[in-house]
Image (cartoon, rainbow, N blue to C red):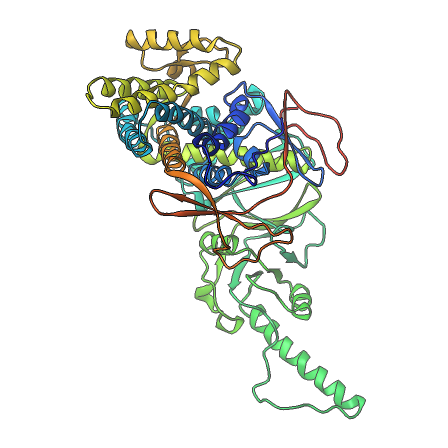
């Protein structure tokens, strides 16, 4: 389906509330069919004709062109949630749409927007209490940590691939004591998902980090055993002359003398490295070409332009200290590793540092048939890694399949029954809105959402608090099914949805304004829009012409000019 919401022709004084709420419900409608293990894919086509097929809500949102400023505000909020939490993008979008839709009905009944916002905010505190009561603790060695990762990636691959990726992700996380700084993920095209592996060590991507190496050539069989590693956090070039001045070259002998002087300076630099028995010189910046060649000839492997995070990781893992210049190198600054070797992966190359005596480090080497599949695989594994870290951080887990939202709905509804003023209406609307998650899961599984909701409420009434919607659409105990999620995911989905809905509800009209950020008016004379609310804050938004196209379907195929169609689940 095409997704375009245009407010460029809207009247500034006659803007209706539903015109402001529309983008939120449109985004929710676009992502609804992607939720859960039975979620369908979207084919997102950009202006160049490139095609991406995915059912990851964050990826779909990234590819949409949204004309409505309110729509962009909502998307930005949901994307911020995805960056911080790593999962729950689609759930958050559905909750935003449902809360805005419910607010529209409350406004028609005479409830003021600020009262609705206050009611939603009150409901979130009760929701968090309900989730905490439902949660169970988990530690890094608990088997439920694997179930958390598996739940996050279920529906993206078949059962065997899901189990494999969950296992290698959780094993790598445990190996680094759940420290994300000691775990890196690399994805390369040209192989199948089954070719993915976990590497005990640091992989430095030669292509993406602009790293270059001399001395190995293209021989993957060659490796340096127990090499001494030095790290220089600056450019490595021959030292400049101590005296400033101008050199005048009058004849070939003068030119030869200048070159001999430069060679001598370079030789001193090479000797200063070789005399310290350095086997691998890792430089965060560039190395002079001539120096690099001479280092390789002297038996020193030069590695230049190493990415900052990789540079720091190598220093910690090798037990080395980075210095500002080669002249500062001494025995105390050097480190060592078990081996350094070059590996060819998917048409590119990586440098592998293994056998790390200092800080342990793990790398996940992911493969995919095409660059798009490899990139999407990396995003999915990062989601699984993020939720596993949340679960292991001490917050606990709750049953999935909408069980957490049913607990929230019951708790907020009970609270609403004890309130004797009009704020009870907002609480009741919130309690009904959060059931959009189990209802959508049931619909996407081919089950009747009303029947599923009734069954869930009956099971909860009988004390089965972990009851949720399974992949088959049936209602069953989610803990028994191994479908669990960190309590932080539904809690932050609710918090983000309420904050975003509150931001939109406080806006009462759209006003044309002069440029407020110093930008020029574009060629057709249009300016950005400022959105004023009763809280006095403006929200700037310009116009984007054209629209992205999102085609729902099962697994997409077919060519498109300039693009490369792919489907991750193929």
Q: Quadrant of residue 97?
A: top left
Residue occupying image coordinates x 55% and y 27%: 30
Q: Quadrant of residue 46?
A: top right
On the image, the x and y values in percent for residue 374 come to 63, 36
On the image, the x and y values in percent for residue 23 come to 50, 32
On the image, the x and y values in percent for residue 152 come to 47, 27
| Closer to us: 113 or 305 | 113
- Total numbered badges shown on the rendered structure: 0
> Can you say whether 301 is above or below 149 in the image?
below
Q: Is residue 70 left or right of residue 252?
A: left
Residue, far front: 13
Q: Is residue 437 left or right of residue 62?
A: left
| Closer to us: 314 or 58 | 58
Q: Quadrant of residue 494?
A: top left
Residue, far right: 252
Q: Is residue 61 left or right of residue 431?
A: right
> Can you say whether 44 is above or below 143 in the image?
below
Q: Is residue 482 visible?
A: no
In the picture, the quarter occupied by the N terminus is: top right
| Closer to us: 385 or 55 | 55
> Can you say whether 88 is above or below 447 in the image?
below
In the picture, the quarter occupied by the C terminus is: top right
On the image, the x and y values in percent for residue 207 come to 65, 51
Q: Is residue 363 visible?
A: yes
Residue occupying image coordinates x 58% and y 36%: 64
| Closer to us: 217 or 381 | 381
> Can you say whether 409 is above or below 65 in the image?
above
Q: Is residue 280 left or right of residue 141?
A: right
């Amino acid at each position: 389906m095409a997704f375009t919401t245009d407010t460029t022709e809207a009247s500034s004084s006659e803007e209706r509330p539903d015109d402001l709420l529309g983008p939120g419900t449109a985004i929710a409608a676009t992502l609804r069919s992607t939720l859960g293990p039975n979620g369908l894919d979207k084919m997102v086509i950009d202006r160049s004709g490139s095609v991406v097929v995915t059912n990851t809500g964050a990826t779909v949102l990234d590819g949409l062109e949204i004309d409505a400023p309110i729509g962009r505000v909502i998307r930005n909020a949901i994307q911020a949630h995805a960056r911080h939490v790593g999962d729950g993008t689609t759930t958050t979008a559905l909750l935003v749409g449902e809360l805005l839709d419910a607010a529209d009905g409350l406004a028609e009944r005479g409830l003021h927007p600020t009262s609705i916002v206050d009611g939603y905010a009150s409901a979130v505190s009760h929701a968090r209490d309900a989730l905490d009561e439902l949660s169970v603790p988990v530690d890094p060695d608990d088997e439920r940590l694997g179930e958390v990762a598996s739940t996050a990636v279920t529906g993206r691959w078949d059962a065997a691939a899901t189990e494999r990726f969950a296992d290698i992700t959780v094993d790598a996380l445990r190996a680094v004591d759940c420290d994300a700084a000691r775990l890196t993920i690399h994805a390369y095209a040209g192989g199948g998902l089954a070719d993915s592996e976990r590497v005990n060590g640091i992989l430095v991507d030669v292509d993406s980090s602009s790293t270059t190496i001399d001395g190995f050539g293209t021989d993957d069989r060659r490796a340096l055993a127990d090499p001494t590693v030095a790290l220089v956090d600056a450019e490595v070039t021959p030292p400049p002359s101590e005296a400033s001045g101008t050199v005048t070259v009058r004849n070939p002998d003068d030119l030869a003398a200048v070159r001999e002087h430069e060679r001598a300076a370079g030789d001193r630099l090479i000797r200063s490295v070789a005399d310290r028995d350095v086997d691998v010189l890792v430089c965060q910046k560039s190395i002079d070409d001539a120096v690099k060649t001479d280092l390789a000839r002297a038996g020193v492997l030069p590695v230049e332009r190493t990415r900052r995070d990789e540079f720091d990781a190598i220093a910690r893992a090798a037990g080395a200290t980075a210095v500002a210049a080669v002249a500062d190198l001494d025995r105390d600054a050097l480190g060592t590793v078990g081996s350094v070797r070059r590996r060819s992966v998917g048409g590119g190359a990586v440098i592998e540092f293994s056998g790390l005596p200092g800080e342990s480090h793990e790398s996940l080497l992911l493969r995919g048939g095409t660059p798009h599949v490899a990139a999407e695989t990396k995003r999915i594994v990062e989601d699984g890694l993020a939720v596993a870290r949340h679960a292991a951080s001490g917050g606990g887990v709750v049953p999935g399949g909408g069980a957490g939202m049913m607990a929230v709905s019951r708790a907020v509804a009970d609270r609403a029954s004890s309130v004797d003023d009009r704020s009870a209406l907002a609480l009741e609307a919130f309690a009904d809105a959060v059931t959009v998650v189990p209802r959508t899961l049931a619909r996407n599984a081919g089950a009747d959402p009303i029947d599923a909701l009734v069954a869930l409420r009956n099971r909860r009434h009988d004390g089965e608090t972990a009851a949720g919607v399974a992949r088959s659409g049936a209602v069953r105990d989610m803990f028994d099914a191994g479908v669990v999620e960190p309590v932080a995911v539904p809690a932050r989905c609710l918090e983000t949805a309420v904050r975003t809905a509150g931001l939109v509800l406080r806006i009462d009209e759209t006003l044309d304004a002069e440029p407020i950020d110093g930008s020029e008016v574009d060629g057709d004379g249009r300016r950005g829009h400022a959105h004023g609310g009763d809280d006095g804050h403006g929200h700037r938004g310009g116009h984007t012409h054209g629209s992205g196209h999102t085609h729902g379907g099962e697994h997409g195929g077919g060519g498109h000019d300039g693009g490369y169609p792919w489907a991750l689940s193929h």
